[in-house]
Image (cartoon, rainbow, N blue to C red):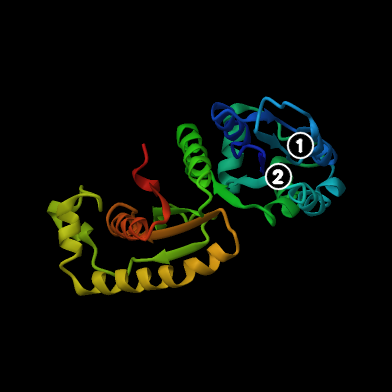
Amino acid sequence: MNLVIVSGLSGSGKTIALQALEDLDYYCIDNLPIGMLHAFAEQITTTPDVVYDKYAVGIDARNLAPNLGEFPTILAAVRAMRIDTQVFYLSADDVTLIKRFSETRRKHPLTSDRLPLNEAIVCERIFLEPIVSNADLVIDTSHTTVHQLREHIRSRTTASGSGAMSILLQSFGFKHGIPIDANFVFDVRCVTNPYWVPELRRNTGQEQMVVDYLESHEDVKTMYADLKAFILKWLPSFEQEKRSYMTIAIGCTGGYHRSVYFAEKLAAELRAQGKTVLVRHRELSP
């Protein structure tokens, strides 16, 4: 039996995540009071002839802060019932969250006459700390569209079903911000940049002409060898911890050439090693 707990900041996309899980045949409940989580787990494990074997519940800051503090204890009790339980936590930067609330004209659940939106977001981050500290997967939706988030949830959930750790290799551009959901962030801005070759400027690291150009330079070869050695050395240690997810972010200046090349090449290497690998190019996503 599988249970996914979806939590995160208001405006970060929790409803979209639950809808994506529902499309994957999860039985979904939004805004479950945290005190009812254990009782819910007992019900789905003791009721005979249950129709579903996959469940998802949404838990957010609408719970009282003291109750949220009990989350680690409740989570441990649920997992002790031999339910395969994963915690997804969605986040976004403050600027993005404020913009989303402004565009939708929705009210943040913690705002009041004495607590403006920006302060409510800060309070919410503090309240949800017991959940994010126990999250199996943190997803930064600051640069993510609704379609991309749905696909991200689908691909990560499907990949984790194999039982192996799901590894996401994500390229990005530093000028657009660092992903906050990465376990490792590697900076490849110091190696040769195809952007300064006029005929390559409009191409990406997925295209053979850019690949050939990069692989003709020794600094690129050395950087790749070092990244590969580091990742292959330390991945087994994370796998031994029974982690379900790993996100490795690789950044260059714009996120179009070098980071894309390294992400694709490392993904191919890891797949050859039998790993479950997903690739996302943040700045190339439609």
Extreme-left residue of the structure: 199
Instruction: Please indicate whether residue 87 sits to the left or right of residue 150 in the image.
Output: right
Residue at left offset 54%, top offset 27%: 23
At x 37% / y 73%, what residue is drawn?
Answer: 229
Nearest the camera: 197 or 244?
244
- Where on the picture, by quarter, is residue 217? bottom left
Residue 22 at x, y percent in the picture = 59, 28
**Residue drawn at 76 percent across, 33 percent down:** 44
Q: Residue at x 65, y 52 (%)?
A: 135
Please indicate, yes or no, whether residue 113 appears anywhere in the rendered image: no
Q: Is residue 13 above or below residue 122?
A: above
Amino acid at circle 2: Ile
On the picture, is 103 further left or further right than 112?
Answer: left
The x and y percentages for residue 134 are 69, 55
| Cα distance in 3D space between marks 1 and 2 | 8 Å
Quarter placement of the N terminus:
top right
Q: Secondary structure under badge 2? A: loop
Instruction: Tell me the tag on residue 186.
Output: none
Badge 1, how many Cα within 10 Å: few under 14, some, many 20+?
some
The vertical placement of 146 against 124, above or below, is above
| Residue of label 2 | 83
Labelled pair 1, 2 in contact (Cβ < 8 Å): yes
With 278 as the anchor, is 4 left or right in this view? right
Query: Which mark, by number, is residue 45?
Result: 1
SS for callout 1: helix
